[in-house]
Amino acid sequence: MPSKKTDAAQPDEMISVRHLTRHFGSILAVDDVSLTVRRGEVLGFLGPNGAGKSTTMKMITGFLAPSSGTAVVCGADITDDPIAAKRQIGYLPEGAPCYPDMTPSAFLRFMAHIRGFRGAEARERIRTAIERTALESVLTQPIDTLSKGFKRRVGLAQALLHDPPVLILDEPTDGLDPNQKHEVRKLINVLAPEKAIIISTHLLEEVDAVCSRAVVIANGRVVADGTPGELAQRSRHHNAVRIEVTRPTTGVEAALARLPGVLAVEPADDDEGAALMVFPRDGRSIVADVADLARAERWDVAGLRVERGRLDDVFRTVTATAA
Amino acid sequence: MGHIAVIVRRELASYFATPLAYVFIVIFLALAGSLAFFVGNFFDRGQADLQPFFTFHPWLYLVLIPALAMRLWAEERKSGTIELLLTLPISMTEAVIGKFLASWAFAGIALILTVPFWITVNYLGHPDNGVILASYIASFLMAGAFLAIGACLSALTKNQVIAFVVTAAACFVFTVSGSPIVLGFIKGWAPEAVLATVAGFSFLTHFNAIIRGVIDLRDAVFFLSVIAFFLYANAIIVDLKKAD
């Protein structure tokens, strides 16, 4: 079958960011960022503070006009047809701003009405959003008086209210305690199959927990893009072997360093014991060699583990080289 | 139209969610009354009209209206909710008009609460109720013009106090632009046509014409044009400043 289109969006391609660029005066905040997010994908947006994550999100949601480039949300161009695009988006802005003198119930009613829901449908949508974000206990208190965690959840409830196909969440778990973080991540995982979601975060564990794809941005440019697993492979910890030898206490480090595939041996940074981290050359698998050596030398091995790779390594490497 | 109504409702509710609404209404009524009675010699003049009451409205508005307008955009920008508002599927025009109409409706409520003055003067004598109605309309239009200026200027800053002071100053210039205070400033160098134009912008001239019973549609058109102009400028300023 002849292919007719080259540029038109795929049916499941729900967010398409095309060469987004934004200047603030002479500062280039976002520099030619392009990416697409499909239905079912959760894209984790990573980067140091000031890298341009929030600015990019503000442009996708139509708050900021791009200096050049555009974003297409569910077929609607945010610069040509902003209202149609905004209808498809649920957005949690940075810091989860909500009208401080309103109560969550009045605030959600306002949001439902302005999105065109009336009567029973509005009540039903508000009820669902409240249930999903567990806001029942604070509905009649002014948002001003709520804790940071509740404020964030009011912001989330507002973003979910109209059950949008696209969710853009700027640091959705910032300020939440570990239980609340877990709840929000669970919620994102539940919503994920039906939606295209972009979340920004600087918590790498969050990328592991919810994201199907991670995009690292530094100085306004995309410096890495892949699944969390792919990114982890770029870590120097990828296929590194963590070994804990209780006896003998000397000579182990030197013996390991003499292995052909080994690049370096360092004390493991994750505990105060005798564990060593053996780094491979070029990310090759060295666990068999290490195990053979241990057996041949008759070491007492208390622990042996292959590392998958660490996102924070990759994060540091790619953002540092971009700087 | 639906979006504007929803915004007006939210804004009005937020006036009444804080003591601002009640403080404003009480102070407005107390000042309007005492100025009319004590400074305007409401009784001693021996005339059944509300001129001493309306005469002071421009000066009252000068102090009180900036307090209503200062929060309209400055607060949204400070709390970050502007990002929420402007990423909703509504147009900038709807947001600007909705906010303005809410503050104007609030000023209207305060004005309606002065109806006891009208009842009193009708009880005491036989005033020209046509002039009184026209004066009410003029006062309401002037409040709208002040509010449009205030809404526009409150979009310039995140700081409500700055918005208040700048609005009060701007409103003062517009109020007295027909008087020597402003005209003397430019008389020396500006041509006659400019002088006439500046004088033509005086709120006081247009307002006083109406409350003296000279009802001219052009005065109403003047206030409506000022409102339209400043709301247009308001939308542009919000667009320019929202990201800072």
Image: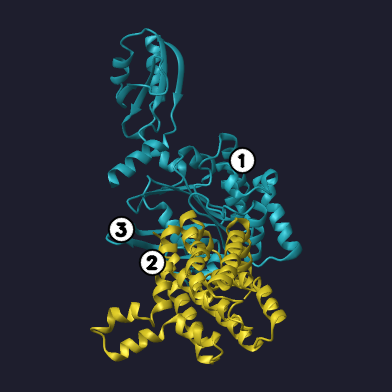
Chain colours: A cyan, B yellow
Residue A81 makes an appearance in the image: no
Q: Disc 2 versus disc 3: distance between alpha carbons?
A: 14 Å
Q: Position of residue B100 (x, y in %)?
A: 54, 71
| Residue at figure coordinates x 48%, y 75% from the top left | B231
Q: Nearer the viewer, residue B54 or A281?
A: B54
Q: Which residue is mark 2?
A: A69
| Residue at figure coordinates x 42%, y 82% from the top left | B202
Query: Tag 1, which secondary structure?
Result: helix
Please name the amino acid that badge 1 sits on: Glu
Q: Chain of mark 1?
A: A
| Residue at figure coordinates x 62%, y 56% from the top left | B17
Q: Nearer the viewer, residue A46 or A12?
A: A46
Badge 2 and badge 3 in a common chain: yes
Badge 1 and badge 3 in a common chain: yes
Q: Residue furthest left?
A: B189
Q: Chain of mark 2?
A: A
| Pointer 1 local density, CA inside 10 Å: few below 14, some 14–19, many at least 20 | some
Rendered position, B219 above or below A2:
below
- The answer to whether mark 1 and mark 3 are in CB contact below 8 A is no
Q: Position of residue A2 (x, y in %)?
A: 49, 72
Is tag 2's residue or tag 1's residue first in the polypeptide sequence?
A: 2
Q: Which residue is mark 1?
A: A183
Q: Which residue is mark 3?
A: A28
Is tag 2's residue or tag 3's residue first in the polypeptide sequence?
A: 3
State which mark lies toward you, 2 or 3.
Answer: 3
